[in-house]
Amino acid sequence: MDCAQAQTVIECYADGELDAVTTTRFEKHLEHCGGCQRALDRLSSLSSLIKEAVPYSAAPERLSRQIRARVDQRNVAPGRAHGAWWHWLRPAALVAVTAVVTWIIAAQLNDPPAKELVAEEVISSHARATLTGHLADVASSERHTVKPWLSSKLDFSPPVPDLASAGFPLVGGRLDYLDHRPVAVLVYGRRQHMIDLFVWPDNGARPVAASEPLSKQGYHVLHWTSAGMTLWAISDLNAPELKTFAEKFSGVK
């Protein structure tokens, strides 16, 4: 099994859904592939973080009362008998309806948008890299060193502009696994701050300009698309400067 095959089954392995033969092949691959082992570790850590951090929201009691009131007020259609069976069945039907509606609302409340989930992955990856001090797999300020290294490990070639003249020097790059695929992470500096920029193809989506950065868990996170790439920037740098970074990055040809 090679890395490309491993990436197609890594999530099933993490969830314990692989058959015995594929599990054995995958584990043998992990024995000599540090990159896939790190990807599995990150996936396992993310799963644990989501279980701990995602809140559970039940349907409000007021909504349940409103549903019960409306069912009680609903008359049987004309021409149908008000037999004893209906009065016996109505409480059971009410409970079933309430349970279904409550479940649907709870599911909606606990199902954050896809972008929010990606933002959580970005934050988790950046926090781990910062805490462990492993910001880069290839540490270099030379784009002609970082870009070829990343391109050789991925199925796409990420843009790696030199932004030193704009005050954002390149520090290096690393590999990561986000949104169900391997991605490039470009690391730029700004005084004493580090900026992680996650990059992967956007599958032909229209360019989306960077909006105001999202503030979360002490970080600013910014998302946009440009030149066929999806881009997520994160840093503890202030929001205006992070937005300037995004504009400078997308403005370099």
Image (cartoon, rainbow, N blue to C red):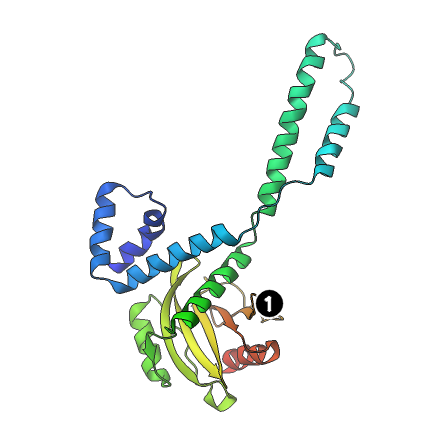
Q: Which quadrant of the view contains residue 115? A: bottom right
Q: Residue at x 30, y 75 (%)?
A: 149
Q: Which quadrant of the view contains residue 73? A: top right
Residue that carries the numbered disc 1 in the rendered image: 214
Instruction: Give the left or right position of residue 122, taking residue 240 as reference.
Output: left
33 relative to 99, above or below? below
Query: Residue 4's spot in the image, x, y percent?
Result: 28, 58
Q: Is residue 60 visible?
A: yes
In depth, the one of 194 and 83 nearer the eye is 194
Query: Residue 230's spot in the image, x, y percent?
Result: 48, 67
211 relative to 14, above or below? below
Instruction: Give the left or right position of residue 164, taking residue 139 as reference.
Output: right
236 relative to 61, above or below? below
Query: Residue 227's spot in the image, x, y percent?
Result: 48, 72
Local packing at callout 1 (Cα closer than 10 Å; few below 14, some 14-19, many 20+) is: few
Q: Residue at x 76, y 24 (%)?
A: 72
Q: Residue at x 28, y 55 (%)?
A: 6
| Count of numbered tags | 1
Q: Is residue 253 visible?
A: no
Q: Residue at x 62, y 31 (%)?
A: 99
Label 1 is placed on what type of residue?
Leu
Helix, strand or loop for disc 1: strand
Q: Quadrant of the N terminus?
A: bottom left
Q: Which quadrant of the view contains residue 136? A: bottom left
Query: Residue 188's spot in the image, x, y percent?
Result: 45, 80
In depth, the one of 56 and 252 nearer the eye is 56
41 relative to 153, above or below? above
